Image (spheres, grey):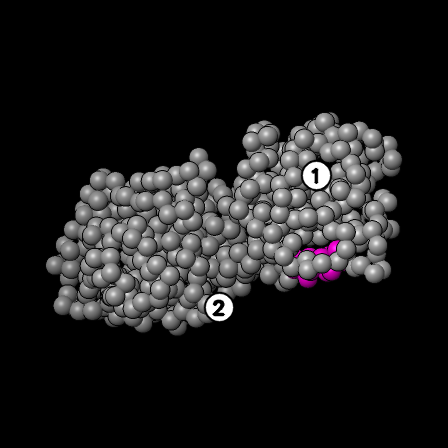
């Protein structure tokens, strides 16, 4: 199901999908916890209570944290230890994360706790879910996580509201955390042994940002194929590059998928039939669409596999094995699996923008456009047409080249060198999100130019491309003379973000993938 069609989800720590996450984060689907998850959490909580009674040293339950793990903490101070953990770790900086990211974080943290290996009271996890369903969204600064002992700073800002502290957004208003919780009738808590660690040791910030960017990248992949097919029509490209036989000889799944998509998108185009044989071959920006777009898809598929595993994993420390009575200190909070793939996905998304800008340049450049007027306007000189549209795309492509530098290759030791290798995975996720935004914008500019070029060409396009062209023309008129292009650019950006074109293409040609 598409996320916008999902109304309710049920979590137990095992089956959360990307589509369900997006349904909750963006479309306010309701969340409930399965009864078996409540039982599992209660069982692991009892294990922690038993440990506190025996006063045997166990990391994070009756000891300090990180480099302070050798410092014992009495049973009487166990709760104070956990509350202090949240207070001292909520030191994030920068702008608040978007509401959709906060919602995804709440969902992911609740789902991980539902597996019953974290020793937290079930009622606290139920409150996280109730915050989601009631629209209480903690204000979480976007910067400050090393992605090593999990997303300590961001998740601490999330946990503050459970304590009646911090700030939360409710119905568009920023309120003190306790006030926001009171508005919807939710209790706040004083944490007990292990519960602070259970809330903040985890990768849910980087996973939330990365998951939403991943979903957008999946849509970008289809939109890049659709928009590039319009550019192929406008530039009178040669179809031989998409011949199935070519791609069977190098059968990467992504490459074959994109080549098939291009064949479907350009099928029954009179324009394409008329222009075959005009050239022996096209420039790479057209001829290598399957190879480049296909490689991006491979990165998307790999990242989705990693994130689907992460959604349903336990990532705090120590881990409670209630059946055996064991408590094990490990490193599941380390963000390296996500950091590497989010860097990879950021590089891939940047490549979609990179090749898109090259197609845009070919359309506006009279030396490369196969007969189109300079900058896609009839009376050029007096009119600049789409000259600066390409400038804007080039600026964002350049921005992406900086943002795509891998964050995961960096590490700065922390906690007096106890935490001596960190992933920087949350920075990777943040930079990925920025790259995706730039790529949306560049593809929107290519779409804008391709429709202008196709109309100047007076060509009879394929049924799918004709439908896409008509959708664009409902919001963006043909440019006869220079006008305020800002409004047209905004309209193009909205079109591809709101999935209007995507829905139309999939309705006409459901075989597009």
Q: Which residue lies furthest to the left in this view?
A: 53
Going 58% across and 47% down the picture, which residue do you hit?
495
Residue at figure coordinates x 56%, y 31% from the top left: 507
Q: What element carries label 1?
A: helix
Residues under labels 2 and 1: Cα distance? 45 Å
Instruction: Give the prevailing secondary structure in the magenta stretch.
Output: helix
Comparing marks 2 and 1, which lies closer to the viewer?
A: 1
| As drawn, 224 above or below 132 | above
Q: Which residue is drawn at 32% across and 47% down?
A: 111
Tell me the magenta residue range: 386-397
Q: Does the magenta portion include 394?
A: yes
Give the image location of residue 452, x and y in percent: 74, 47
How crowded pointer 2 is (Cα within 10 Å; few <14, some 14-19, many 20+) is rated as few
Residue of label 1:
229
Residue 412 tag number? 2
Q: Does the magenta stretch include residue 225?
A: no
Quadrant in the picture for residue 150? bottom left
């Amino acid at each position: 199901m598409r996320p916008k069609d999902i109304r309710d989800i049920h979590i137990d720590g095992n089956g959360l999908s990307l589509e369900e996450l997006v349904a909750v984060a963006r479309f306010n689907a309701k969340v409930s916890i399965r009864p078996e998850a409540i039982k599992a959490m209660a069982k692991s909580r009892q294990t922690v209570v038993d440990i506190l009674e025996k006063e045997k040293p166990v990391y994070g339950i009756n000891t300090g944290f990180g480099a302070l793990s050798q410092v014992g903490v009495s049973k009487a101070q166990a709760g104070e230890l956990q509350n202090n953990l949240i207070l001292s770790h909520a030191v994030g900086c920068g702008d608040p994360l978007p509401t959709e990211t906060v919602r995804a974080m709440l969902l992911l943290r609740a789902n991980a706790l539902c597996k019953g290996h974290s020793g937290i009271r079930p009622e606290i996890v139920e409150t996280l879910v109730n915050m989601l369903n009631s629209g209480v969204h903690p204000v979480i600064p976007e910067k400050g996580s090393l992605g090593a002992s999990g997303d300590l700073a961001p998740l601490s800002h999330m946990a503050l509201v459970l304590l009646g502290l911090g700030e939360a957004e409710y119905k568009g208003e920023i309120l003190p955390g306790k006030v926001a919780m009171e508005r919807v009738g939710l209790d706040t808590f004083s944490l007990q042994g292990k519960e602070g660690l259970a809330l903040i040791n985890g990768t849910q910030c980087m996973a939330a940002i990365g998951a939403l960017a991943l979903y957008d990248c999946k849509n970008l992949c289809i939109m890049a194929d659709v928009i590039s097919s319009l550019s192929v029509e406008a530039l009178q490209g040669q179809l031989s590059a998409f011949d199935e036989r070519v791609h069977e000889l190098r059968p990467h799944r992504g490459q074959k998928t994109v080549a098939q998509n291009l064949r479907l998108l350009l099928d029954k185009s009179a324009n394409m039939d008329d222009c075959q044989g005009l050239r022996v071959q096209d420039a790479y920006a057209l001829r290598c669409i399957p190879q480049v777009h296909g490689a991006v898809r491979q990165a998307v598929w790999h990242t989705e596999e990693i994130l689907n595993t992460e959604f349903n994993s336990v990532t705090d420390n120590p881990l409670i094995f209630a059946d055996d009575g064991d408590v094990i200190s490990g490193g599941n909070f380390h963000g390296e699996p996500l950091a590497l793939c989010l860097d990879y996905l950021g590089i891939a998304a940047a490549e979609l923008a990179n090749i898109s800008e090259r197609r845009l340049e070919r359309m506006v450049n009279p030396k490369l456009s196969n007969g189109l007027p300079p900058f896609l306007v009839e009376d050029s000189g007096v009119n600049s047409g789409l000259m600066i549209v390409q400038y804007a795309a080039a600026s964002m492509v350049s921005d992406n080249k900086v943002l795509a530098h891998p964050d995961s290759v960096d590490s700065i030791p922390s906690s007096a060198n106890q935490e001596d290798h960190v992933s920087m995975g949350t920075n990777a996720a943040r930079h990925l999100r920025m790259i995706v935004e730039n790529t949306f914008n560049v593809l929107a500019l290519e779409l804008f130019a391709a429709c202008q070029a196709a109309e100047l060409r007076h060509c009879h396009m394929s049924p799918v491309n004709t439908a896409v062209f008509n959708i664009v023309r409902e919001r963006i008129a043909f440019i006869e003379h220079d006008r305020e292009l800002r409004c047209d650019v905004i309209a193009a950006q909205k079109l591809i973000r709101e999935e209007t074109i995507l829905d139309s293409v999939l309705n006409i040609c459901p075989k597009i993938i």
